[in-house]
Image: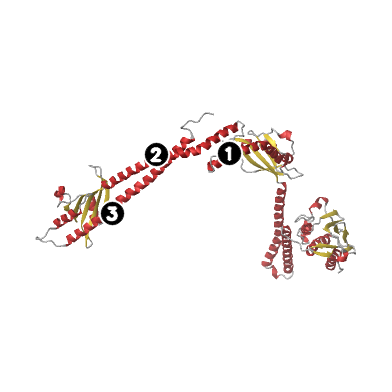
Amino acid sequence: MKKVGPFRSIHFKFVLIYVLLILVAMQIIGVYFVRELETQLVQNFKSSLNERVTLLAYNVEQAMSKEHDSKGPTLEEEIRSLLHDFVSQDISEVRVLDDKSKVLATSNPYMQNIVGKRATEIFVKRALVTGEMVDRTLIDPKTGHRMYISSTPIKLNGEIKGAIYIIASLENVFSQMKQINAIFATGTGIALVITAVLGIFLSRTITRPISDMRKQALAMTKGNFSRKVKVYGYDEIGQLAMTFNNLTKKLQEAQATTEGERRKLALVLTHMTDGVIATDRRGRIILINDAALNILNVSRETVLSSSIIDVLGLEGQYTFETLIEERDSLILDFSTDEELYILRASLSVIQKETGFVNGLIVVLHDITEQEKIDQERREFVANVSHELRTPLTTMKSYLEALGEGLWRDENIAPRFIEVAQTETERMIRLVNDLLQLSKLDSKDYKLNKSWVNFSRYFHKVIDRFELTKNENVTFIRKIPDEAIFIEIDEDKITQVLDNIISNALKYSPQGGNITFRIKELSDEILVSVTDEGVGIPKSDLSKVFERFYRVDKARSRKLGGTGLGLAIAKEVVVAHGGRIWAKSQEHKGTTIFFTLPLERIQEDDWDEV
């Protein structure tokens, strides 16, 4: 490495910057100070002069207001006497004029010939017309000096009687400013010399440890980590030197851990649940983890060096160039007729600092379940809309007929009202079932469990249906006589049994049987309800617990069903930690099974009720 020249060293640059900084700071301060001082001196000069003019104007007003006879001095003589006392070194000339612009007197002995003549200065005319003082600062074209000119009106009892015209020199003010500037320039020079000396001393204290660190860095590039930087103090530079020594030690350790970190990264990519694919700048796959291989169902040998467009099945839709420009994630549909399979591909471009594209990172997520949930949600909304629309349409037509006068028909009107009432009750049942499902779906839903003798409890539920049923159906009970105590939410399980038994009654033929069973297993009880109805087709058997599903839609609506009974039953049973399923043979009947957890307890702890 070449030796650093004296004018390129940080030592020289530091001193130069330090001196320039002081110079610039003093110049900025000087410009502001001189400008403000000049403004203040000029303003003080004008204010002092204007105060004297005001006094002179008052004396002239008094002279004009007096009557002058032949024995005493004339007005012009009295004014000349006033001007003689007014004139000073800075005032070049003072004129007193009447309201017709005629010169009454002048302080300049060499311009007495203008007395009695009309003045032509524009400042005099403005003061006489406006009644206000007019002043300007101008440059004398002959001498080049700055001159202050003002014209002040003389008023007597509110009327303008004349004006005082003054020409004053500002050179004394600016001469003072020149002296101040010279003093400031001398002070700046002295300050710069002192600053340069201090800068050289200060820069040496900073550049010496930096030079030592430079030598240490050169040694580190050659693999020598044993050398240490000398610490000259405990200021920021000293702390930097100590940090540099620590850096040398850390760098040794970093070299040893880099390979280990690389292996860890490989393990992370291998065990990530999301698929990760990396490409080169041409779109060829250079890295793919095991999760991506499983998601895409391909082998590593077949996809490495293959185009990312081909592997993701984007031919005809994208090129690698358009894929790089894509800002949104892509939805990849690999579904078949038998199975839904949806992936989301998130894209991230690998760029160098220059902005050059060096490749592409693709992260694959399996969103099949999410798509299924969204599809079920859409179907649920459509079913709810359909179920509500049907009774509302019926009610609207019947109520319109009644509104058009059919209510007067004593035979038809009651039937129409009965239909409207039936459809209203059907909608109420639908809304109540939906509210029940919503509660069961909520995470904060809690069951109010209590211990009950399930055998006796099951008999009470069956008795209620046997007393109120209208169908000619026989109930067969195969329930153990011994007590079976389980912990359940009695209201919710009653709703489950009501839904199952109601369905069995609806679909049982006249003269048929409904059989109720309880079987005690090792850690649960098995409850079943069997009817001898039309049964459920095998293809539809797995769907009976879905919301709004009906095997015979026409008959179900006619009987007032909402299609939510078994769905509610499933949610309640699952909330209790049980299972529910169905078995059926067409034209022979259907059996609904469900289980509830059973905890073995000592019978002595319970008293028979």
Residue 167 higher or lower than 415, as above or below: above
* Quadrant holding the C terminus: bottom right
Contact flag, marks 1 and 3 (Cβ < 8 Å): no
**Lower sequence index among marks 3 and 2:** 3
Q: In which quarter of the image is residue 591?
A: bottom right
Work out which quarter of the rendered image holds the N terminus and state it: top right
Q: Label 2: which residue?
A: 193
Is disc 3 placed on a helix, strand or loop?
Answer: helix
Secondary structure at numbered mark 2? helix
Using the numbered discs, state the Cα–Cα distance from disc 3 to disc 2 in whole angstroms. 41 Å
Q: How far apart are marks 2 and 1 (CA)?
A: 35 Å
Q: Residue at x 74, y 45 (%)?
A: 340
Q: Which of marks 3 and 2 is in front?
A: 2
What residue lies at 72% left-to-right and 46% top-to-bottom? Answer: 368
Residue type at the position of mark 3:
Ser
Q: Can residue 11 be seen in this view?
A: yes
Position in image of residue 328 (x %, y %):
62, 43
Residue 244, which numbered label? 1
- Indicate left or right for 31 with 542 as reference: left
Within 10 Å of disc 1 (Cα), the crowding (few <14, some 14-19, many 20+) is: some
Q: Which of 213 and 77 is in front in this view?
A: 213
The image shows residue 386, relative to residue 111, as above or below, that is below
Decide which of tag 2 and tag 1 comes sooner along the chain.
2
Secondary element type, mark 1: helix
Q: In which quarter of the image is residue 421?
A: bottom right
Q: Where is residue 541 in the image (x, y as percent from the top left)?
A: 81, 52
Crowding around mark 2 (Cα neighbors within 10 Å: few <14, some 14 to 19, many 20+) is: few
Q: Which mark is residue 47?
A: 3
- Its colouring scheme is secondary structure
